[in-house]
Amino acid sequence: MNRSHRRLALLGMALSTACFGAHAYAAQTMQMDMHGTMNSTPAAADDGMYEFTLDEVIITGYRTATPLTLSTDPQRPRQPIPAADGAGYLKTIPGFSVVRKGGLGGDPMMRGMGGSRMVMDMNGGGMSGGCPNRMDPTSTYAFPETFSRIIVNKGPQSVRYGASVAGSVIFERETERFEKPGVRGNISVLGASNHRFDELTDVTAGGKEGYARIIQTRNYARDYADGSGRRIHSGYGRHSLTGIVGLTPDPDTLFEVSYDRSRGWAKYAHGMMDGSQFDRDSYAVKFERAHLSPVVEKLTLNFNNDTIDHIMDNYTFRPGGMMGTDVKRVQYGMRAVTDLRFSPQATGAVGIDLRRDAHYFAEAHRRLKGSPNNDMDIKNFGIFLEYNRDLAARSRLRTGLRYDRTETDYHNARFRNPMGMLMRNLVPGSASDHAVSGFVRWENTAKKQPLTFYVGLGHAERPADYWEAYHTWAAYSNRRLGMNATPAATRPRKEKNTQLDLGWVYAGEKTNASLSLYYAHIHDFILRLPQIGMGMNARTPYGNVNARLYGFEAEVTRTVSPRWTLGASLAYTRGDDRTNDAALPQIAPLEATLTAKYSHKKLETNAVWRLVSHQNRFHKGYGSVTGTDYGPTGGFGIFSLSLAYRPDENLTFSFGVDNLFNKTYAEFVNYSEAAIASLGIPAGGHITEPGRTFWFKSSYKF
Ligand SMILES: [Cu+2]
């Protein structure tokens, strides 16, 4: 990058600051080069490349290059402009939907299944949020631009990161090694309507022996306006800081220590309270050693420690309230994985992981603060095996097996109301679960064309998670309400999914297409039941039903001329609760996206048209940890445009308008349960999405 470009970058940032009334900058790292080639990672080692990425500036669509897996670079601009957390980035992937609560903290679902059905792994470990009402799913703490890539594995066709009922999402962070001493960095800023401002600064200094890296992010937005100009209670602010030190004594060894800290707050339109504090402090240690022997390709050790301290209340951002709760989760995780190569045709892996997780509650009322009491501890031990074999020149067999043991200790969850009256006093107990998961998949690539067919059968079992266990316990074992049931007596049985996945992936030079079909039979699906009682005595238990889900995702991208690329995607899921003969709740309707990209030299323009069908299949009051169904929604089409200018590989400017026609619309899966009387906001209904949104993003890499 020459000097004039540097000046241009600074000018652009100054301009964006002026345009959007904002006050700082953001940056990013591009570990992946601009053409999307990737270094192999443990997960990628035997899969080769995940995705083939065009030399595009703005991401508007996804291309699957290997069966059931896709990867995306979170550091590039994308349209529509996503929310500033992990869920925002997942929402644009076909097959994903997000339960909106406010501006941040949406709860992502894959094929209608979220929460613990979708394994989430961040920087080498699993991490859960602190809130019993899921104000902070894991993705809330995933600041996308601080990661090198987001990898999605669909279905129970992987066992490496946990028993994946719906699939897994991996937020991976890799710092590129230095060949000689130097400094690398990225700065990026984003300004948008509603006073949104995101910034990221990412600087790495290092040499052959190691590196030190600092990443800072800042996000802020005021309440957004929907298409009718109505303000939605959704403002947020947060700040994160990451420090990483890595030692690379030789090309085969990496020892890395990292620290992640974030502080935040968010207003929530969907519930009785807002998140006035989201504090996270994480430490992680990673050790990697490659080529240990001809058989042992790689050894990876991870240690993670995460502490979440979250306060929710109705007095910080709403006048007149007095109630609040401080919840805390302290978790430790350890994972050891060995990637093996038995012969040129056969590879495998073996790994174990251990997790320990303690949850705490304390009163945080306006005038009454309590001290933390440990309501529940969960310990998990998991072991997995993978074995892959080439059967013939163009066909492969992939298999995996996993065993998990989970111990849940129910201590007590004493909780007082703002007047000091004991409202919750639960019966202690414990439960132990065993779960076995596995898959087998056959893949075959055609002889004359880049077309791969796959068919796989998978099974995944998962016991009730913290949210399901806690709420069911609170519903049936509260001594204050005269109940004496032990938690084990009412705890939902483990959920068992058996799923068939099949599809085709076509990765041609000009055309990329994929079709994936699935059919899942879930025995003892853990279903959220309608609320019992009102006010402080409201409880939401969970129970088991038999369920069936099926659907598909289809994507096609075609370069029709040197300047034009057209794309389309379609995703559909249908879910049935066979026990109650009803719709399975929280299933987003049929959705399609049409995209057109025109690129010429340093300029690129995009049009994105997202079309969502109406949804009449719902089961009011029923749901999952992510949320409950409320009622039907109508269909809508949202049209967005953008323009990008990339003077050279290191500098980009992009500008866009999302929801150009300022439509008022709502996604099916969310629901606002509480009125905010003091702010004149009525209860009920689906939360409407942002109206016309202008945005500008610039990034500069050095
Ligand atoms: Cu909360």
Image (cartoon, rainbow, N blue to C red):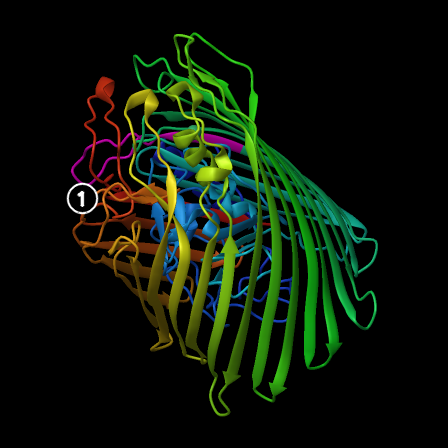
Q: Which of these two is toward me, 610 or 315?
A: 315
Q: Which of these two is toward me, 269 or 369?
A: 369
Residue labelled 1 has its Cβ within 8 Å of some atom of ligand 1: no
Instruction: Check disc 1 and report the residue beneath it.
Output: 664
Q: Position of residue 326 (x, y in %)?
A: 49, 22
Principal secondary structure, stretch drawn in magenta: loop
Which residue is at 34% across, 77% downward?
Answer: 561
Residue 23 visible here: no
On screen, residue 327 versus residue 214, left or right, reads: left
Q: Position of residue 216 (x, y in %)?
A: 57, 37
Q: Quadrant of residue 15?
A: top left
Q: Quadrant of residue 509?
A: bottom left
**Up/down of 389 relative to 32, above or below:** below
Which residue is at 49% across, 19% downward?
Answer: 414
* Name of the residue lying farthest toward the bottom: 448
Q: Quadrant of residue 350?
A: bottom right
**Up/down of 548 relative to 503, above or below:** above
**Rendered-image quadrant of the N terminus:** bottom right
Which residue is at 72% across, 81% downward?
Answer: 344
Q: Which of these two is toward me, 85 or 214?
A: 85
Q: Position of residue 187 (x, y in %)?
A: 54, 43
On screen, residue 584 versus residue 22, left or right, reads: left
Amino acid type shown at disc 1: Thr
Residue 445 visible here: yes
**Is residue 140 in the magenta section?**
no
Stretch in magenta: 223-239
**Up/down of 536 relative to 93, above or below:** above
Q: Position of residue 165 (x, y in %)?
A: 47, 57
Q: Quadrant of ligand 1?
A: top left
**Is residue 226 in the magenta section?**
yes
Q: Residues within 10 Å of mark 1 (few under 14, many from 20)?
A: some
Which residue is at 61% across, 86% downward?
Answer: 391
